[in-house]
Image (cartoon, coloured by chain):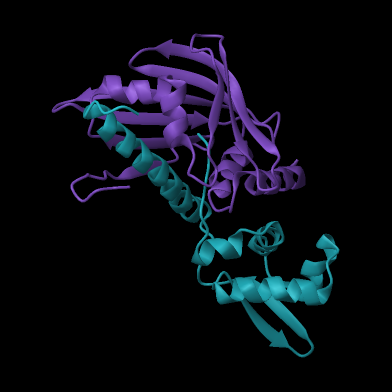
Chain colours: A purple, B cyan
Amino acid sequence: MTNDTQRRNDTSITTPSDTEIRIERVFEAPRELVWEAHADPELLSEWLGPHDHPVTVTEMDLRPGGSYRWTSPGPEGEELAFYGEYREVSPPQVMEMTFEFSGAPGHVSVDRLELEELEGGRTRLVSISTFDSKEDRDGMLQSGMEKGVAEGYDKLDALLARRR
Amino acid sequence: MVQFPSLDGTFSALSDPTRRAILERLGQGGATISELAEPSGMSLTGLKKHVRILEQAELVTTEKHGRTRHCRLGPKRLDEASHWIEAYRRNAEERFGRLDELLERQKKGSPR
């Protein structure tokens, strides 16, 4: 639960190009802690998914070429998986990985996370996701309007299939 | 990053693939209900239901000409990314809110 004193910073989302989504957010914590929250499987699973869609980090080989896998129960009890490979790992600054979802295999994006140290023990997070096509990117943006991951990607599949 | 979105207002109107297909089609120009129903293979009644939901969300307006109903995009234009981005942003915000809480606990050095 959030207490009254806790500060919530704004999250900015932009689309720098037709195939990118950029997220920027400042955290009131030192960079090492923000890095750890992304690099430690236990910590990562604590915040990645909400209570009704908890995410478990089942694999995390944090080095270039190493793979990762996150799982989450789907709406009908099936297992959803998110997986990929790390491309760059430079603690506590850069983490770049490929990202793919079991519900839309073959639609691979690249997520690049950069953490910048700010004054006063704060950290700026910039995450850029690069997609293969504008359709893939728009599908991901549209999935933000869906009820759940599985449903969202089913619809993304359908949308992509129509446009193919 | 993972998307765990929530529905609300206008977005629920857009949450259905049939309705998104309708908007996509109307983006190319106005159409009658039967023209919209044709590619989807859906019944006219089923399609009308979807159009009504889109109409309530002001994403579509309709006009009756004789026995046919003409549909076109409504005042609340689906300006491609702006709607999507807002929903996407809210998701990210939820996720980062949880990260904020985790970081607070970590800063205090309390066990996780």
Q: Is residue B64 above or below residue A69?
A: below
Vertical arrangement, residue B88 with respect to residue A36, above or below: below
Name the side, left or right, on which A66 lies relative to B103.
right
Task: Identify the image quadrant of residue A122.
Answer: top left
Counting from the top left corner in percent of width and height, residue B42 is at 83, 67
> Between residues A153 and A34, which one lies in front from this camera angle?
A34
Residue B59, image x and y in percent?
Answer: 57, 69
How many numbered dots are placed on residues in this image?
Answer: 0
Q: Nearer the viewer, residue A132 or A97?
A: A97
Quadrant where the C terminus of chain A is found in the figure: top right
* Residue under the image location 59 percent in, 65 percent down: B13
Q: Residue at x 79, y 88 (%)?
A: B67
Residue sticking out furthest to the left: A120
Q: Position of residue B60 (x, y in %)?
A: 60, 72
Q: Is residue B40 above or below residue A57?
A: below
Q: Residue at x 63, y 73 (%)?
A: B53
Looking at the picture, how far across and down is residue A25, in whole percent?
Answer: 32, 37
Residue furthest to the bottom in view is B66
Q: Quadrant of residue B39?
A: bottom right
Relative to B23, say whether A103 is above or below.
above
Give the quarter of the image for residue B78: bottom right
Front residue of A66/A158: it is A66
Q: Is residue A102 left or right of residue A41?
A: right
Confirm whether residue B77 shows in the render. no
Specify the farthest residue to the front.
B111
B33 displayed left or right of B75: right
Q: Answer with left or right where residue A42 lies relative to residue B24.
A: left
Is residue A41 among the parts visible in the rendering? yes
